[in-house]
Image: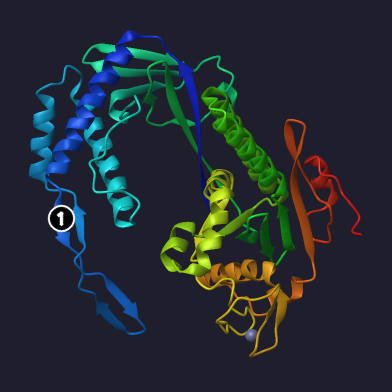
Amino acid sequence: MKTLKLVRMYSIPVSDPRVSELITWYLGTLQRAIDIIWENVEWRHRFPRIKRKKQVLIVPSKFKAPELPKSKSFKKKLRNDLLLDCPYAKHWVDAVIRTAYSIMKSWRKRYLKGRARKVKPRVGKRFARCKITLMRVDYREKRIKITLKPGEYIEISWSGRWFTRRVEGWRVGEVVLKDDRVLIPFKSTRIIEVRNVVAWDSNELSLDGFSPRTGFIMVDLKPLQSMKITYERKKRIAQSKGLKSIYEKYVTRERNRERDFINKLASGLTRLLPNTTHVFEDLEKEDLVCRKKTSRNRRKRNARTPWKLIQKKLSEKAITVKVSPKNTSRTCPRCGCVLKTRVGRLFKCPRCGFELDRQKLASINIYLKHSKMRGFPHSDEPEKTMMEELWVGVTPSGRSPMIWIPMKRGPESDEAKGRELGIKQYQAL
Ligand SMILES: [Zn+2]
């Protein structure tokens, strides 16, 4: 049994000049808070610890890491300073401080990874993130009352909206105010009884899965790729002719079609593989583990295939787990031998003679990593199911992509399920 947290964001239009005024104050104060935190960042030398077998190496380095001020006295002073210019309820200052810290924390994280420069973050987009203490939610009337000042409120109702029935019984989270609309996150939880595990290897043209229950699963991503290539060409032409608005139109269209594809893919997979934990490689860790030449191609193709988006979408609809990507494409799943090189389409273990198509190897290793982590027995599972295959594809048929199976030999998902999805079945050639 696992709990899946569900969040759905809906927006409701508002037209109230007080909202824009609040946002203007919010952003000014937010930037001030960031300025003050920035001035109080301490730059400390770091001595990274590297564990090598049983030894711990402490590496001296000239690199200085930023530490955000955390003391109670600092936070109290910051709050008092910001309160001097606050015509709104005091909780709004707390909302600002929290947002300022979250912006600074994410800057720090990116800086430590080498993805951000040593430059103070600037607030760009116009928004104001509310705090739960500033909100009163009436679930019966479907109404949110947001405090501006003591005794002054903004009221927003989601009664009669198109999504009202979809969020029946859900809780309201912290809303975000925009100049012309309010974004409301609705939260809920679902208990899922996990009966199946599928490990996914992310490749440019396919998502290659392995599960001891289903066997190999191949999700075809070629339609997504060809769509992206088409738009890349269109964008290039628009750019070379200096047609900025047309270029931007293509950017938006490409993004919408990509999102649409990924949404359909994620819901298709959750319907095709119900009660399933999906295991992925941790792409954040990938950058840390292999920064050498061998991974350059991999990183390049990851840039085109929106892996993180696919993982994120799936994690909103199903239970997902991430494992380290280390050595997944060169470890023998039978004896654990790690090969030095990666050549050819076929993986051949020099120690035990195990052979497998390299494309399928990583998914088995990802599966094994997960089951070791969970302490499941896995002795001969992969070998038993290696002969079974399930192929899944998302094809854009007109405007709505659908899932199809060109070939199926899996024991699990039966035809009934396939029909429900609008799955076309093909006989293997
Ligand atoms: Zn082996």
Q: Is residue 143 above or below residue 249?
A: above
Quadrant where the N terminus lies?
bottom right
Q: Which residue is pictured at 77% across the width and 56% down the height? A: 391
Regarding ligand 1, which quadrant of the image does it lie in? bottom right
- For ligand 1, tell me if the residue under mark 1 lies within 8 Å: no
Helix, strand or loop at label 1? It is strand
Q: Judge by depth and name the residue closer to the eye, 244 or 76.
A: 244
Q: Residue at x 71, y 53 (%)?
A: 219
Residue type indicated by callout 1:
Trp
Give residue 394's quadrant in the image: top right
Q: Quadrant of residue 34?
A: top left
The residue tagged 1 is: 43
Residue that sits furthest to the front in the current view: 241
Viewed as shown, does residue 154 lie left or right of 365?
Answer: left
Q: Locate the C terminus and report the quarter of the image it occupies.
A: bottom right
Left or right position of 339 against 399: left
Residue at the spot x=68%, y=55% of the render?
206
Residue 350: x %, y % from top left: 65, 89
User: Residue 422's spot in the image, x, y percent?
Assistant: 81, 40
* Residue 150 point in image, percent of width and height: 21, 15
Question: Is 368 placed left or right of 429 in the picture?
Answer: left
Can residue 1 be spotted in the picture?
A: no
- Height in image: 412 above or below 169? below
Q: Is residue 208 left or right of residue 101?
A: right
Categorize mark 1 by other alpha carbons within 10 Å: few (<14), some (14-19), many (20+): few
Location of residue 312 in the rendering, given as x and y in whole percent from the top left corner = 52, 46
Q: Is residue 192 visible?
A: yes
